[in-house]
Image (cartoon, rainbow, N blue to C red):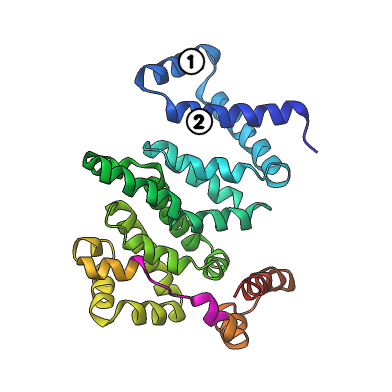
Amino acid sequence: MTSIKEQAAISRLLSFLQEWDNAGKVARSHILDKFIETNQGKTAPELEQEFSQGASLFLPIIGTTHPSIVDCVLKVLGTMHLEVQYEAIELIKDLVGYDVRQALLKGLVALLIPSVKEISKLQAKILSDPSVLQLTPSLPMFLQQAAAAKAIGVLARNDMSIAEELLYLRVVRGLMAAMGNTDHSNSQRLASLTLECFVQMFPLVAEHVRKCMGEELYQLFLSNAEDLYMKIDSIQADILAANTVNVTKALCLHGSSYSMNTLYGSRDSAQMAYLTHFEEDVESKE
């Protein structure tokens, strides 16, 4: 159990992150002035030690008593400030080691496809005011989409087991949908790079992506995933955005051959039980 003092510290940290993200240049200047005043006289090693001690306390607490941290971190991904986004992704890398892992992965995949409600709101605004189109690159839902694609790529490259879990959450469909978002080129670029990672890691994914894209688009993708968004036409973008790729279903239908042998290889019993949970969860929803 965490103490009232520890919970208050976490609350202050989250409030600080949100305050910093929403602050303008003048407000940030005041925040920094206050920080300097508070830590006047401390050496760099002392400050580094203080922050490292804070982080070592913060993460174990989050892992067991603060699942709501997932919503907070995912919301921060909608920032326009790259330094804040970077810190959020670094925190995500740590959080997947705790019991908020499944909720976090599900949340990241969900961000790849903005809700119909949000898209409808945007379309209505554009119809009433065409100038809104100029603001789409800075809309939080698209910034979150791009950042989620980036974070998923970072996690998948760092840990094969996380990449495998993401397959059961239909990450491939989400990434391809983001690649078809012609309203946000950065989402397209980052999603394409992350999909490339999954294609290279899993032959099954490559097979499904190729079938959905068609040979011409697939070869373009293989030749230069990062620049693909600049080469596709509107029809190809629509194919990506409306894709129904379901690698998860294939994994479940061929569970014994794909899931246990080809994809997972040798795992200890705890890992196998955890990963099998994803199969059962998906099967119950099919």
Q: Which residues are magenta?
A: 241-251
Q: Which residue is mark 2?
A: 18
At a point 25% along the width and 39% down the height, the residue shown is: 129
The answer to if 126 sits in the magenta stretch is: no
Q: Is residue 132 left or right of residue 44?
A: left
Helix, strand or loop at label 1? It is: helix
Helix, strand or loop at label 2? It is: helix
Residue 85 versus residue 113: which sits nearer the camera?
113
Distance of label 1 from label 2 (alpha carbons): 19 Å
Q: Earlier in the sequence, mark 1 or mark 2?
A: 2
At a point 46% along the width and 77% down the height, the residue shown is: 202
Q: Position of residue 218 (x, y in %)?
A: 28, 76
Q: Position of residue 25 (x, y in %)?
A: 35, 21
Q: Is residue 23 left or right of residue 68?
A: left
Marks 1 and 2 in Cβ contact (< 8 Å): no
Q: Is residue 129 left or right of residue 190?
A: left
Circle 1: residue type: Ile
Circle 2: residue type: Gln
Res. 36 mark = 1
Which quadrant of the figure contains the N terminus?
top right
